Image: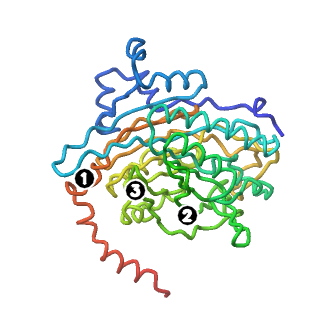
């Protein structure tokens, strides 16, 4: 295997935001931010040593500095006050990270390195006041589905009793938070079938439910159908103490009806845990979750892993490209988008990161009332049209 240190790597910019801040004058930058991001989502982190001394986020900042991860804590604009409902303030969190151990290491070492990193990042989220945390797609392993090698299936485990569940259950209970844990699932009760699954764990550490990935890519090196097929759980929405949440796993973000069904089923926050690379999808990444949030009057959270993963053996994917040992650069850039067209800045394209966003779930209904998207959606019309379209010819 070509060691990652010996492979010539392209220069990767840290983020779109950092490029704009470095080269655009303040007045023009304010204009661009308004157009690109909607309303301002101010940072809640202290900006001076004096502020830091008394800030409740001081410990989170210190942990981020000592453990080398980016920390962003921001707030969406307050929702207008209502006479009959109190604000429903929630802090949601997206966590992104690289694979700490090389893919040549024993699987137990890779898994342990991932657990150690995630434990630190979740602690940072807890110190920043996060109530609901979502990890990246298949967080317990390298995204090895490009290789088509079957030994990577050793990372698969039961959703409600495997190592990942026990690990996440402990953290959820310790920090009193809901955690969405996307894993490679092995359904031992049904012939050891493999699924790409997101598990939801409550603040008491108990299993709430799971969702299996609805749409499986067959493009480029995304050879996932070698391992698992489309999920069978539909579009579940999970009631939690911090709102009604759903999970649209990775490739499902390219399918607007997938986003829509979670909204029709009552979701207020939809997480999109992903593993996607720059050459394929980066121009789409910044708009897809945001479009979904606007169209469906909920909050959407895009999470993507970071870094380049090198595998021991070369592979190809029938796309005329020469054999290679890496999938490409996972560009991170996790962000949160609101129903009112506001979105946060992204996390880094190159660093592990924790993004915490404070939001008011009352905004979802307020936007529905204001824009009338559900009232004007003409769902029965499209149901009839889709039924007619699906008839065999």
* Mark 1 burial class by Cα count in 10 Å: few <14, some 14-19, many 20+: many
Mark sitting earlier along the chain (2/3): 2
Counting from the top left corner in percent of width and height, residue 121 is at 57, 35
Which residue is painted at 44% across and 35% down in the image?
129
In this rendering, is residue 122 above or below 213?
Answer: above
Relative depth, front residue between 57 and 102: 57
Rendering coords of residue 93 (x, y %): 47, 41
Q: Which residue is mark 3?
A: 244
Name of the residue lying farthest toward the bottom: 393
Residue found at x 80% / y 48%: 314
Q: Residues within 10 Å of mark 2 (few under 14, many from 20)?
A: some
Q: Kindly check if marks 2 and 3 are in contact, taking CB atoms under 8 A apart as contact.
A: no
Residue denoted by label 1: 367
Q: Left or right: where does residue 304 sit relative to residue 3?
A: left
Can you say which quadrant of the picture contains the N terminus? top right
Position of 324 compared to 249: left or right? right
Q: Is residue 253 above or below residue 228?
A: above
Q: Nearer the viewer, residue 133 or 208?
A: 208
**Who comes first in sequence, dot 1 or dot 3?**
3
């Amino acid at each position: 295997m070509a060691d990652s240190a010996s492979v010539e790597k392209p220069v990767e910019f840290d983020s779109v935001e950092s490029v704009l801040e470095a080269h655009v004058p303040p007045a023009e930058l304010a204009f661009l931010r308004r157009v690109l991001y909607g309303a301002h989502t101010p940072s809640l982190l202290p900006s001076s040593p004096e502020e830091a001394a008394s800030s409740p986020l001081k410990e989170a900042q210190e942990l981020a500095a000592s453990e080398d991860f980016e920390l962003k804590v921001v707030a969406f604009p307050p929702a207008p006050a209502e006479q009959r409902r109190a604000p429903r303030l929630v802090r949601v969190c997206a966590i992104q990270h690289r694979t700490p151990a090389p893919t040549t290491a024993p699987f137990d070492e890779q898994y342990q390195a991932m657990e150690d990193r995630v434990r630190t990042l979740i602690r940072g989220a807890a110190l920043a006041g996060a109530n609901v945390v979502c990890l990246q797609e298949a967080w317990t392993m390298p995204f090895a589905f490009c290789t088509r090698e079957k030994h990577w299936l050793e990372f698969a485990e039961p959703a409600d009793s495997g190592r990942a569940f026990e690990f996440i259950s402990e953290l959820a209970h310790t920090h009193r938070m809901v955690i969405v844990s996307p894993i490679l699932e092995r359904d031992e009760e049904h012939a050891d079938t493999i699924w790409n699954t997101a598990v939801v764990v409550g603040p008491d550490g108990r299993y709430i439910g799971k969702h299996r990935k609805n749409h499986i890519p067959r493009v480029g090196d995304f050879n996932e159908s070698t391992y698992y097929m489309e999920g069978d759980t539909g579009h579940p929405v999970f009631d939690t103490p911090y709102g009604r949440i759903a999970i649209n796993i990775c490739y499902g973000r390219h399918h607007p009806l997938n986003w829509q069904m979670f909204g029709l089923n009552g979701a207020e926050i939809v997480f999109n845990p992903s593993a996607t690379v720059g050459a394929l999808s980066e121009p789409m990444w910044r708009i897809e979750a945001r479009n979904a949030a606007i169209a469906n009057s909920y909050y959407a959270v895009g999470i993507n892993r970071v870094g380049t993963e090198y595998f021991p053996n070369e592979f190809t994917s029938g796309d005329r490209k020469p054999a290679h040992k890496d999938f490409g650069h996972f560009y991170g850039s996790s962000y949160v988008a609101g129903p009112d067209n506001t979105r946060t800045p992204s996390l880094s394209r190159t660093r592990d990161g924790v993004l915490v966003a404070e939001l008011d779930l009352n905004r979802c209904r307020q936007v529905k009332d204001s824009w009338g998207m559900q009232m004007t959606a003409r769902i029965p019309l499209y149901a009839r049209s889709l039924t007619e379209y699906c008839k065999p010819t």
